[in-house]
Image (cartoon, rainbow, N blue to C red):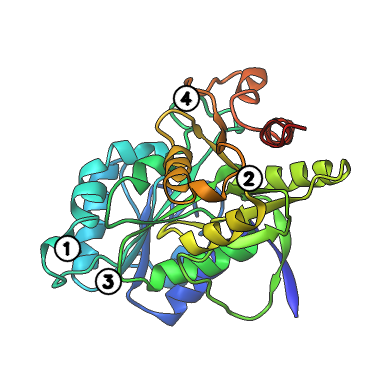
């Protein structure tokens, strides 16, 4: 059996089920209670679970992220939301210096079972301070786990696993995926963190990607198939821990790679993946790894300019042909 849900409704269902299952789970963030979240993910939660488990916070990201770290150390399982992932810069100390490091620095005496949900991405006309994709920022710091689902099914299974994990997990959720609807299994399921998914099998080239760019990569692969070019699309789903075995398997089959990401190209996580593949899988490559990323600019507010700022299927098609000399 299956049901059709949007990504936002899948996340809502995962949160609801986990709050029912475990009374240590609570949610906190700006407009999460009375308003029910700017994307309507927690509508009705306040009435069902009460103000002790569904908490509206002041506009103070550093403050409520610090509260979440403390609550997690005391055995609770906070799920907090930044209205935009950009605001993580305001809360850098509790996220990067406390949550990420506490388990190691206490010799395992303190764990931080918290989830930080962080809507990200361009295309919504939110301008430079609300449109970034900051996966490189979070992935840089040991101690944080990072997920970036591309579908309703993956969002549901990954969020549930993240809430049950004993380490801090950053959930990067592209804002323009929230309305994407698809069939998902009707029964409860978990997707383990650190397991990638081959969204399309192929033999000529591997596209490594995540989040919204998975959909663009699949569109590009369909166009390329019309010309006899068979592309594999590997959705990482979890950025940390990385499913390196899945990358090795795919690259060893296709021998050509592009990495597609919406983040700014300079200093990107795509660059880290490219370097790791070049270092460890050099003999498997028939051509250099190419990155297809956002431009090295502040995200414009202008719709015409913003839409040129991140990779589209046509850009992916061109990159594949460049690597394959087609």
Residue at label 2?
256
Residue at position x 19%, y 56% from top? 101
Residue 282 vertical placement versus 77 (above, below): above
Residue 296 vertical placement versus 293 (above, below): above
**Disc on res. 104:** 1
Q: Marks 3 and 1: in contact by CB < 8 Å?
A: no
Asked whether residue 79 is in view, the answer is yes
How much space separates mark 3 and mark 2, taking CA atoms? Answer: 45 Å
The spot of residue 63 in percent (x, y) is: 23, 47
Mark 2 or 4, nearer chain start: 4
Mark 2 or 1, nearer chain start: 1
Which is nearer the eye, 153 or 321?
A: 321
Secondary structure under the numbered disc 2 in the rendered image: loop
**Disc on res. 217:** none
The spot of residue 241 in percent (x, y) is: 40, 60
Q: Marks 3 and 4: in contact by CB < 8 Å?
A: no
Residue at label 4?
128
How much space separates mark 1 and mark 3, taking CA atoms? Answer: 19 Å
Residue at label 3?
76
Asked whether residue 210 is in view, the answer is no
Mark 4 or 3, nearer chain start: 3
Residue furthest front as drawn: 283
Q: Marks 1 and 2: in contact by CB < 8 Å?
A: no
| Nearer the camera: disc 2 or disc 1 | 2
The spot of residue 247 in percent (x, y) is: 54, 57
Mark 1 or 4, nearer chain start: 1
Question: How crowded is the residue under tag 1: few (<14 C-alpha within 10 Å), some, or many (20+)?
Answer: few
How much space separates mark 2 and mark 4, taking CA atoms? Answer: 34 Å
**Left or right for 23, reference 63:** right
Secondary structure under the numbered disc 3 in the rendered image: loop
Mark 3 or 2, nearer chain start: 3
């Amino acid at each position: 059996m299956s049901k059709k849900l949007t990504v936002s409704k899948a996340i809502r269902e995962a949160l609801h089920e986990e709050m029912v299952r475990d009374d240590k789970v609570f949610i906190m963030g700006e407009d999460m209670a009375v308003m029910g979240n700017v994307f309507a993910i927690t509508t009705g939660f306040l009435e069902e679970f009460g103000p002790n488990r569904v908490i509206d916070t002041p506009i103070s990201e550093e403050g409520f992220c610090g509260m979440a770290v403390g609550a997690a150390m005391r055995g609770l399982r906070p799920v907090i939301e930044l209205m935009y992932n950009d605001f993580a810069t305001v809360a850098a100390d509790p996220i990067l210096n406390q949550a990420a490091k506490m388990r190691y620095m206490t010799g395992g005496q303190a764990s931080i079972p918290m989830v930080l949900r962080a809507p990200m991405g361009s295309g919504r006309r939110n301008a430079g301070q609300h449109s970034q994709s900051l996966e490189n920022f979070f992935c840089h710091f040991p101690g944080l786990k990072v997920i970036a689902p591309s579908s309703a099914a993956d969002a549901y299974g990954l969020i549930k696993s993240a809430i049950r994990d004993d380490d801090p997990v950053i959930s990067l959720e592209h804002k323009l995926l929230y309305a994407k609807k698809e069939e998902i299994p009707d029964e409860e399921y978990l997707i383990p963190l650190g397991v990638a998914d081959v969204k399309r099998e192929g033999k000529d080239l591997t596209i490594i990607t995540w989040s919204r760019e998975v959909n663009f990569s699949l569109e590009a692969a369909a166009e390329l198939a019309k010309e006899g070019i068979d592309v594999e699309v590997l959705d990482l789903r979890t950025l940390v821990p990385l499913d390196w075995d899945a990358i090795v398997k795919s690259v060893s089959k296709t021998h050509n790679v592009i990495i597609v990401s919406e983040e700014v190209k300079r200093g990107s996580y795509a660059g880290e993946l490219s370097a790791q593949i070049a270092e460890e899988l050099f003999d498997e490559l028939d051509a250099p790894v190419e990155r297809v990323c956002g431009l090295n600019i502040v995200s414009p507010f202008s719709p015409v300019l913003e839409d040129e700022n991140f990779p589209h299927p046509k850009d992916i098609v061109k990159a594949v042909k460049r690597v394959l000399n087609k």
